């Protein structure tokens, strides 16, 4: 999706938020009446910090257990800056919509470890890529097409996977399977397994920003992106004691929003 200019984003924000705020009031009242034990998240569909602040003002008095953020509108640095501002508003749980990629999963794991009680995300990529005969790699979340008509470098073809589904098959073995349900099923199960294992590894390596950086560098070639993510996360990590301060957190969120560009 190409970058929208600001006017488009504001119009889009206004049109969805008008309805979202009305529904938020209705659903909050219905929840209180019929199912107070069910957790309720507000879905923020916006593009910048000013829009999030305006929504938080409008939601004043309504209670939500968490907030949903959409990665389509928010690349990793904007996701971090929204999370910082939500932390300032005492949010405890975040759900990321469609977050099955390396930067979102890494940021989510780090924030889950240091800022929030819980950060969750949903994904259908494991299934979608399985149907499209695409293999995902542990640690990088990179992909390769496992079909003979697509050329894959020899050193990648010969990689073997020891997950419970591939059981030692090489990428080339999978590539040469005829296209059909058996291959799609194997790749979907492999992808699900690898994605879950990668998410867990990101969380386990998020104790410090350095550990996360080193794990990512060991598994992915996206060095520029990884080093920028490290710059952002280590800055936040060092200053985490000040995140309750209104002016400070807004300044930091704005800085992270503007400063980082790597994809
Ligand atoms: Zn596998």
Image (spheres, helix red, strand yellow):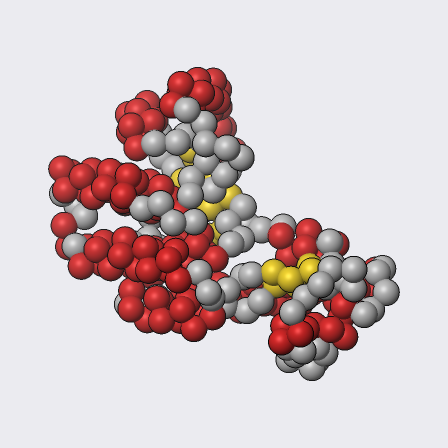
Which residue is nearer to you in this view: 199 or 176? 176
Instruction: List x then y, in percent, for residue 170.
Output: 70, 77
Q: Is residue 150 above or below residue 37?
A: below
Q: Is residue 82 above or below residue 201?
A: above
Residue 155 appears left or right of 237: right
Give the x, y percent position of residue 248: 14, 42
What residue sits 76% from the left and 70% below the top? Answer: 174
Q: How many marks?
A: 0
Residue 102, percent across and down?
A: 48, 57
Q: Is residue 259 above or below residue 204?
A: above
**Residue shown at 29% from the left, 28% from the top:** 50
In terms of image quadrants, where is residue 107?
Answer: bottom left
Say which of 4 and 14 sits in front: 4
In the rendered structure, the answer to whether residue 48 lies left or right of residue 30 reads: left
In this rendering, the answer to whether 24 lies above or below 201 is: above
Query: Which corner quadrant of the image does residue 118 belong to?
Result: bottom left
Residue nearest the viewer, comparing 21 with 237 = 237
Q: Position of residue 226 (x, y in %)?
A: 37, 60
Q: Residue at x 30, y 40 (%)?
A: 257
Q: Is residue 33 visible?
A: no
Of 51 and 153, the residue lying toward us:
153
Q: Is residue 48 visible?
A: yes
Residue at left 18%, top 39%?
251
């Amino acid at each position: 999706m190409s970058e929208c200019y600001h006017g488009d984003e504001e119009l889009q924000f206004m049109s969805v938020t008008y309805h979202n705020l009305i529904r938020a009031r209705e659903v909050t009242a219905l929840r209180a009446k019929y199912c107070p034990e069910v957790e309720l998240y507000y879905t923020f569909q916006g593009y910048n910090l000013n829009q999030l602040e305006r929504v938080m003002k409008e939601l004043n008095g309504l209670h939500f257990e968490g907030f949903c953020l959409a990665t389509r509108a928010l690349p990793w640095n904007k996701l971090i800056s929204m999370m910082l501002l939500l932390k300032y508003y005492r949010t405890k749980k975040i759900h990321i919509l469609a977050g099955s990629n390396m930067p979102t999963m890494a940021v989510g794991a780090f924030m889950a470890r240091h800022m929030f009680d819980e950060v969750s995300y949903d994904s259908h990529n494991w299934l979608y890529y399985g149907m499209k005969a695409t293999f995902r790699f542990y640690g990088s979340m990179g992909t390769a097409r496992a079909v003979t008509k697509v050329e894959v470098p020899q050193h990648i073809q010969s990689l073997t996977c020891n997950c419970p589904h591939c059981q030692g098959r090489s990428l080339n073995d999978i590539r040469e399977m005829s296209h059909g349900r058996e291959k799609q099923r194997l790749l979907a199960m492999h992808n699900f397994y690898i994605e879950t294992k990668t998410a867990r590894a990101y969380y386990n390596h998020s104790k410090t920003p350095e550990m996360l950086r080193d794990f990512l560098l060991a598994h992915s070639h996206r060095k520029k992106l990884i080093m920028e993510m490290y710059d952002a996360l280590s800055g936040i990590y060092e200053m985490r004691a000040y995140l309750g301060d209104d002016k400070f957190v807004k300044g930091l969120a704005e800085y992270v929003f503007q400063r980082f560009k790597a994809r």
